[in-house]
Image (spheres, grey):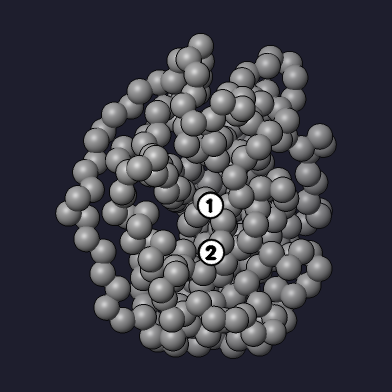
Amino acid sequence: MSITISGRRHYCTIRRIVLASFAFFAASPLLVIFLLQEPGESFGLEKSLRNFRSNSTLDHKIPEGNIKVQPDLKDVQYSSKNNRVNRLHQPVNKAQQVVGHKNIELPVLKEGIIGNYEPRMPRKGPDGPGEGGKKVGRIPEEEEQYAQSYKEHGFNMVNSEKISLDRTVPDLRDSECKFWHYPSKLPLSSVVIVFCNEGWSTLMRTVHSVINETPPELLLEIVMVDDFSDKEHLQTKLEDYIKIPFFQNKVKLVRNVKREGLIRSRIIGAQHARAEVLIFLDAHCECSPNWLPPLVAEIAVNR
């Protein structure tokens, strides 16, 4: 098993598992996990996850509205006894054949030619506060509300509610990023978002940004895992909202019947996910333009 970090102009060898991190506009972490197994080889973590998915009693039919009620998860165990972390960062020689993928093209930089997954036209959000990442000022009359917001959420939810759920954020990538061309055949991804009593605007802006900034052909679903929230806006309002046409029936909601915590809830989300690639996002981040293909390309090339 190896942990890989991708460089600007080379691609690292990936064995069995890829752990990749990515900084968003809100400096929130992204975790991508992809399970790989070489022919005739037994790999404990992949086997464990597959068994967890196939044997779990949690895998039942989704009720109306893509909503599952998650029973209590007990005695989930994982042993890493036979799994070693080999810190091998080996660049792939583009002149060499990529084992296992004879028909997959390597990512290539084409100066002056917009990348194959880049939007043809930059997305424009609605005019209003916070558009393009602009600062939203404070109003003296709202100072008491600000204080309550910081106490409850840890940030200014009052101003967040003034910002459109479809706002754009600055494109902070290096100038060459938009000229990279990635394999035309990339694996589908499931995005897992765990939340508990999250503010409405920050949570749904995260989900909106995934839909807005991800090539639709690469996104299979967004799995929202509610870790036993009790706030009113995360009950019926949320269940109804994820049914709107904007989400293309790609959002499903899983509810825990008791507080499980972040990691166990992510495991629950992984159990309900169906795609080859699992991506875990915080509940208060925003995706930047074309964020997904560079990450998934590492997996497609080195699988």
Q: Residue at x 41, y 27 (%)?
A: 12
Residue sitting at x 53%, y 52% = 276
Q: Is residue 92 visible?
A: yes
Amino acid type at circle 1 is: Glu
Residue 209 in view in this figure: no
Residue at 56% x, 70% y is 224
User: Where is 303 relative to 262, above or below?
Assistant: above
Crowdedness near tag 1: few (<14), some (14–19) or many (≥20) residues, C-alpha within 10 Å: some
Q: Which amino acid type is marked by label 2? A: Ala
Q: Is residue 53 left or right of residue 137?
A: left
Q: Is residue 241 left or right of residue 207?
A: right
Count the labels in the image: 2
Q: Which residue carries the number 1 mark?
A: 276
The residue drawn where x is 81% and y is 68% is 245
Say if 243 sits above or below 2 in the image.
below
Query: Is residue 19 placed above or below 246 in the rendered structure?
Result: above
In depth, the one of 75 and 120 nearer the eye is 75
